[in-house]
Amino acid sequence: MYYVYIIKCIDGTLYTGITRNLEKRLFEHNNTEKGAKYTRNRRPVKIVYFKEYPDRSLASKEEFRIKN
């Protein structure tokens, strides 16, 4: 199972990504250097949207659609 997620940064900007483990990824964005470079200076972040997809291909297509 894959998740497409949108997080809101402390400065009000949004970041979209894909993960297999939503809780772990949110922890990484907020607490480690494994979080996206974009979010490192915009902590804390919180999830404002997520949706499950059965495979990476569908999740990637949805992420692309959201970003465009």
Image (cartoon, grey):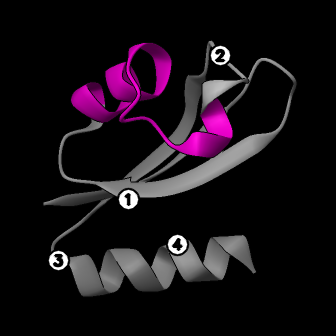
Q: Looking at the rendered structure, which numbered label has been put on residue 2?
A: none
Q: Provide the secondary structure element on which disc 2 rests.
A: loop
The three-letter amino acid code for the residue at tag 4 is Glu
Q: Position of residue 48 (x, y in %)?
A: 60, 33
Using the numbered discs, state the Cα–Cα distance from disc 2 to disc 4 in whole angstroms. Answer: 22 Å
Q: Seen in the image, is 16 located left or right of residue 32?
A: right
- 15 and 33: which is toward the camera: 33
The three-letter amino acid code for the residue at tag 3 is Asp
Residue 52 lies in the magenta stretch = no
Q: Provide the secondary structure element on which disc 1 rests.
A: strand
Quarter of the picture holding the N terminus: bottom left
Residue under label 4: 63
- Mark toward the start of the polypeptide (1 vs 4): 1
Is label 2 in contact with label 1 (beta carbons under 8 Å)?
Answer: no
Q: Looking at the rendered structure, which numbered label has been put on residue 55?
A: 3
Q: For the magenta stretch, what is the residue range?
A: 23-39
Residue that appears at 62% across and 12% down = 44
Residue under label 2: 43
Q: In which quadrant of the rendered view does residue 38 lie?
A: top right
Using the numbered discs, state the Cα–Cα distance from disc 2 to disc 1 in whole angstroms. Answer: 19 Å
Q: Main secondary structure of the magenta part?
A: helix
Is label 1 in contact with label 3 (beta carbons under 8 Å)?
Answer: no
Using the numbered discs, state the Cα–Cα distance from disc 1 to disc 4 in whole angstroms. Answer: 7 Å
Q: In which quadrant of the rendered view does residue 45 lie?
A: top right
Residue under label 1: 18
Is label 1 in contact with label 4 (beta carbons under 8 Å)?
Answer: yes
Comparing labels 2 and 3, the label whose residue is closer to the camera: 2
